[in-house]
Structure formats: C-alpha cells, structure tokens
Amino acid sequence: MYLGHHIRKIDKSGRIRLPKEFLENGARSFILNRSFNCSLTLQNSADWEKTTKTIGAVDMRIEKNRDFVRYFYRGAVELHIDNKNRIFIHASLLNYMQAKNELLFIGLLNRIELWDLEVFNQSRHSLTPTTDGPYLSDDLNYFNAKEFSDFCHFLRIGILK
C-alpha cells in the first residue's frame, strides 16, 4: 500500500530516486503510464495486472472504448529500479506531465501518482470548501463539510511546498 507524499528532484538524464517508503513492498519493477491532468501513474506488476484485466473487459466494438484503450496502453512502459533506487522517465512522459525540476509522488493505496510540483500546486487551488465541499462530500460519501474545509485549508497553507 502506498500512502503519503514525497518530493524529489529529477536529474538531467530523466532519472529520479523513488521514496524509500514506496519500496518497502520489495517491488523492483513498476509500470509507468500516463494518467489524467498531466500526471503519471506508477503501479507494481501485480496491481498493473488487475488494471489490465479491468480494461481488457471493455467492449472493443465501441469506438470510444477502443480510443481509450489505445490512449491508455500507448504510454505504458515497464521500469526497473537501479541500484540507487532510481527510475528513468522517458522524455515523452516528462513532456506530457510538463516536468521541470521537482516531482511530487502521491501514494494512492495501490498506485503512485507523479506530478510536476508546480503543476500540482497550481491545480490544487481550484478545490474550495464552499464550491466543491458539498458536492464531493455527497459524491464520495467520505468528507463531511467540516472535514472538507479542513482538507482545503491543509492544501492552501502549502504543506506540499
């Protein structure tokens, strides 16, 4: 399980050191893929297999499904961790995520999201308790209004800087 967030600098050759907390399950290879909103997703092989089973079950006779499957798989690459716990991210994926200098790793249970820190910090300000709180609370059945307000305050104070 992947939890928490970590910030790492990317070197000039596209290598970045994985947070040690994300290596505790012993995985030495991952699948890296494009995700939504200019982010990347990193999954271990077992979780990638579950993802591909789900995607493999879509009806390929429907054009939008075929388009999604093509989009999804064309960015996927297998990565192996080197002896310094680094992975290499290809330039096309770095361009997709608009990576500049620092990347943010966010543990999301069975996967890890990678963001350019600046892109993430710009996008996170769109979450506000007054406009999104009730909607997200009802939709996710997770946050109540007070918890969501606290969560947004946590984001606004720049805890990820």
Image: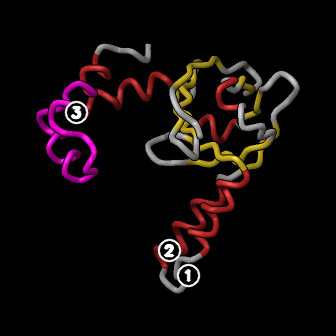
| Residue found 57% across the figure and 61% down from its top | 71
Mark 2 vs 3, N-terminal side: 2
Give above or below for 151 relative to 63: above
* Number of numbered discs: 3
Instruction: Please tell me in which quadrant of the rendered image residue 69 appears.
Output: bottom right
Task: Tell me the residue that label 2 is attached to.
Answer: 65
The colour scheme used here is secondary structure
Crowding around mark 2 (Cα neighbors within 10 Å: few <14, some 14 to 19, many 20+) is some
Q: Main secondary structure of the magenta part?
A: helix
Crowding around mark 3 (Cα neighbors within 10 Å: few <14, some 14 to 19, many 20+) is many
User: Label 2 to label 1, Cα distance in Å?
Assistant: 6 Å
Instruction: For the C terminus, give its image quadrant.
Output: top left
User: Label 2 to label 3, Cα distance in Å?
Assistant: 34 Å
Mark 2 vs 1, N-terminal side: 1
Q: Which residues are magenta?
A: 127-151
Q: Are marks 2 and 1 in contact (CB under 8 Å)?
A: yes
